[in-house]
Image: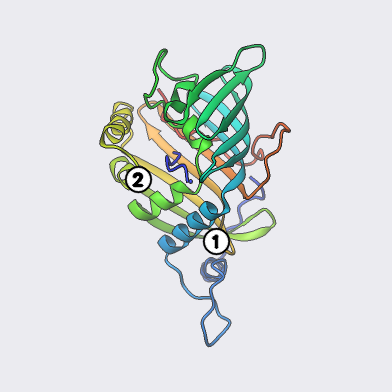
Amino acid sequence: MPALRPAVKGAALLLLAAGLTACSVLAVSGDRTPISDRPTVRPPRQVLLSASQRLDDAGGARIQAVEEGPAGRRSASGTVSWGAHDSAELTVTDELGTGRLRGRDGALDLGYTGAAPRTADRDRAESLDPRAVPGGQTGWSGGWITGLLANPGGSARLMALAGKLTPLGGEELNGGTVAHYRGAAPVADYFGAEEGLSPARLNELLDYYERRGVAAVEYDFWVAPGDRLLRVRSTVKGASGAVVTTTDIAEGAEPADSAATDAPADAPAAAPTPAG
């Protein structure tokens, strides 16, 4: 599930033996004790907050996102930036075909081949979602469009503040060892940690998930040395089944006009919204 804060698979999984796993989790933190070269223990909350802040400071990233669930499959890839001047240049594939989602300083347009682009401002981003209620302007449609435009590190921040975090050890990703963390939180706690939400918007979100039988959200985070957030995966289980969204992140990428590719085939496809 994407975070709303605008300012936020490669190799097969390698499960390490218990002792080695603990060491690898510590090692990816990059911290060292003053009297030795042995890595120090860092709480998952600290790691995720640091990773979120680093991505926030980077100001932009290239992303590859895939969502999949009972309602179907979607993908998007390209570049996004946040901060004083937000922007986005993304290729999206969804129920309506392949299109381009562009954003600049809060103004958005989404156009598909052979059709005139639809426009909205950032506050009405959800109205561009093909699954949005016809005629809806601000209603929450699950967060797919909003999440594509936001800093992907925002979910790490919210889960660090509101969730129960579990370190899952070291894994191989993109040619190196990274730390894998999992967090889970009740829907109300997760969104309640977002200080930028108005009470009306928070109630809208909670109603959306309650009507779909979603009580909690779960996130997985893969963090490389230096607190580099490389992958985020959300899992949302509702009355109609589970949807999973996987987003791969390369921080600080320059915008590009070329069409981006889907996430690697061995990563579970994903969707941040509950089905139905």
Mark earlier in primary sequence (1, 2): 2
**Where residue 233 sits: x, y (%)?**
51, 44
Q: Residues within 10 Å of mark 1 (few under 14, many from 20)?
A: many
Give the residue drawn at x 71%, y 38%: 256
Judged left or right of residue 216, residue 7 is right
Mark in the foreground, 1 or 2: 2
Tag 2: residue type? Glu
Q: Residues within 10 Å of mark 2 (few under 14, many from 20)?
A: some
Which numbered disc covers residue 194?
A: 2
Q: Are marks 1 and 2 in contact (CB under 8 Å)?
A: no
Judged left or right of residue 170, residue 275 is left
Q: Most extreme residue toward the right, as rendered?
A: 258
Looking at the image, what colour scheme do you see? rainbow
**Nearer to us in this view, 180 or 255:** 255
What secondary structure is found at the residue carrying circle 2? loop
Q: In what quadrant of the picture does the N terminus appear? A: top left
Relative height, residue 175 to residue 202 (above, below): below
In space, the residues marked 1 and 2 are separated at their CA atoms by 22 Å
Tell me where residue 166 sits by quadrant: bottom left
The residue that disc 1 covers is 227
**Where residue 26 sits: x, y (%)?**
52, 70
Which numbered disc covers residue 185?
A: none
Tag 1: residue type? Asp
**Residue 192 shows in the view:** yes
**Where residue 12 sits: x, y (%)?**
64, 50
**Where residue 72 sits: x, y (%)?**
53, 24
Give the residue drawn at x 61%, y 46%: 61
Relative height, residue 174 to residue 108 (above, below): below
Q: In what quadrant of the picture does the C terminus appear? A: top left
Relative height, residue 3 to residue 176 (above, below): above
